[in-house]
């Protein structure tokens, strides 16, 4: 699955904290579950890979993507920007959903205090401009990548350029206090400009990283119930199971039946020492045509 993922031109990544009792330096210290997935628009063999790591310094994704050549869509975490700088083959694209959050928070706070003045605020104007990017990009999602790129260049790129010119003007004129939510939002988008513009260069690059957040949501819901892992080995096992189940879902499989099938079949592929040649596993992959029909979700009529 990892080999398949790293062969793709566009991938996405995110991470979420998780508690691992036996791998923590102190009580309640955070360890991390990383998720790496195929680009949102890639439908042939979609892949989700979970990876447990004790921390989230840049060495963690650096090792995973060391031999990767392509575009990595992420949030604004500096660790991913270091990948862009340290790995010649990697281009980091940032997420517009993250770019709008400070403005959304400012509007929400202002709406409680002075609803009448909200529409005149810089934060509200920023949200309206970004919403127009999204509105047009949503119209383009069903187009082939080449057509989507042409439309983005013609219709969205001028709006993006206008947005950054406007944001820089607002910051230069000190239209809002720099430490306010709106000021922080302006500062953020200005410093992330190059990363936020990458989606304009390829129709296969999504405008945001929401697909990664959806891929990791099942784990986030789960950890509210089981709360923690006891050991790093247990967290690694959890990552393995989530990788298979989430990839199965993306490939329209029923996870229970897929697990039952591969656990039945895998022993047949083992040599006398219990090892399996990965090259022989093609017919067991979540996208394999050889999978039995019971593993597949019923097709809607």
Image (cartoon, rainbow, N blue to C red):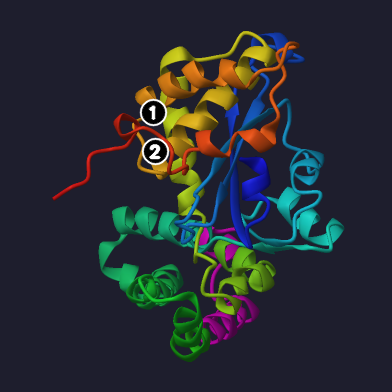
Residue marked by disc 1: 255
Horizontal placement of 7 versus 241: left or right? Answer: right
Residue 149, above or below 295? below
Q: What are the residue bounds of the magenta stretch?
A: 160-184
Quadrant of image for the N terminus: top right
Q: Secondary structure at mark 1?
A: helix
Horizontal placement of 93 versus 114: left or right? Answer: right
Determine crowd level at label 2: few under 14, some 14-19, many 20+ residues with C-alpha closer than 10 A: some
* Most foreground residue, 125 or 60: 60
Residue 156, above or below 16? below
Asked if residue 163 is among those painted magenta in the image, a careful observer would answer yes
Residue marked by disc 2: 249
State the residue at coordinates (60%, 55%).
11
Task: Report x, y in % for residue 49.
Answer: 58, 38
State the residue at coordinates (70%, 13%).
274
Determine crowd level at label 1: few under 14, some 14-19, many 20+ residues with C-alpha closer than 10 A: some
* Most foreground residue, 3 or 232: 3
Task: Report x, y in % for residue 50.
Answer: 59, 34
Tag 1 or tag 2, which sits nearer the N-term? 2
State the residue at coordinates (50%, 81%).
146
Task: Report x, y in % for residue 165.
Answer: 59, 85
Horizontal placement of 18 versus 217: left or right? Answer: right
Residue 75, above or below 260? below
* Most foreground residue, 260 or 272: 272
Q: Is residue 19 visible?
A: no
Q: Is residue 272 visible?
A: yes
Task: Report x, y in % for residue 124.
Answer: 38, 70
Q: Secondary structure at mark 2?
A: helix
């Amino acid at each position: 699955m990892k080999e398949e993922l790293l062969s793709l031109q566009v991938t996405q990544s995110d991470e979420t904290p998780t508690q691992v009792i036996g791998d923590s330096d102190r009580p309640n210290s955070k360890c991390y579950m990383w998720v790496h997935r195929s680009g949102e628009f890639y439908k042939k063999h979609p892949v989700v890979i979970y990876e447990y790591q004790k921390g989230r310094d840049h060495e963690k994704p650096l090792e995973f993507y060391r031999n990767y050549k392509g575009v990595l869509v992420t949030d604004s975490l500096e660790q991913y920007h270091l990948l862009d700088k340290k790995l010649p083959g990697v281009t980091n694209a940032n997420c517009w959903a993250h770019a709008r959050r400070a403005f959304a928070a400012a509007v929400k706070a202002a709406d409680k205090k002075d609803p009448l003045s909200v529409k005149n605020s810089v934060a509200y104007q920023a949200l309206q401009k970004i919403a127009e990017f999204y509105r047009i990009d949503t119209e383009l999602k069903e187009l082939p990548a080449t057509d989507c790129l042409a439309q983005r260049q013609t219709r969205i790129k001028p709006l993006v350029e206008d947005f950054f010119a406007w944001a820089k003007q607002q910051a230069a004129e000190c239209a809002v206090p720099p430490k306010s939510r709106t000021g922080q939002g302006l500062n953020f988008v200005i410093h992330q400009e190059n990363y936020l513009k990458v989606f304009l260069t390829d129709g296969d690059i999504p405008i945001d990283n929401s697909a990664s957040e959806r891929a990791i949501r099942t784990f986030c819901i789960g950890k509210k119930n089981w709360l923690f892992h006891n050991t790093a080995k247990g967290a690694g096992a959890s990552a393995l199971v989530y990788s298979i189940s989430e990839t199965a879902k993306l490939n329209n499989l029923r996870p229970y039946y897929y697990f039952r099938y591969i656990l039945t079949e895998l022993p047949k592929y083992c040599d006398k020492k219990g090892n399996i040649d990965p090259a022989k596993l093609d017919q067991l992959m979540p996208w394999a045509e050889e999978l039995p029909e019971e593993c597949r979700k019923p097709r809607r009529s």
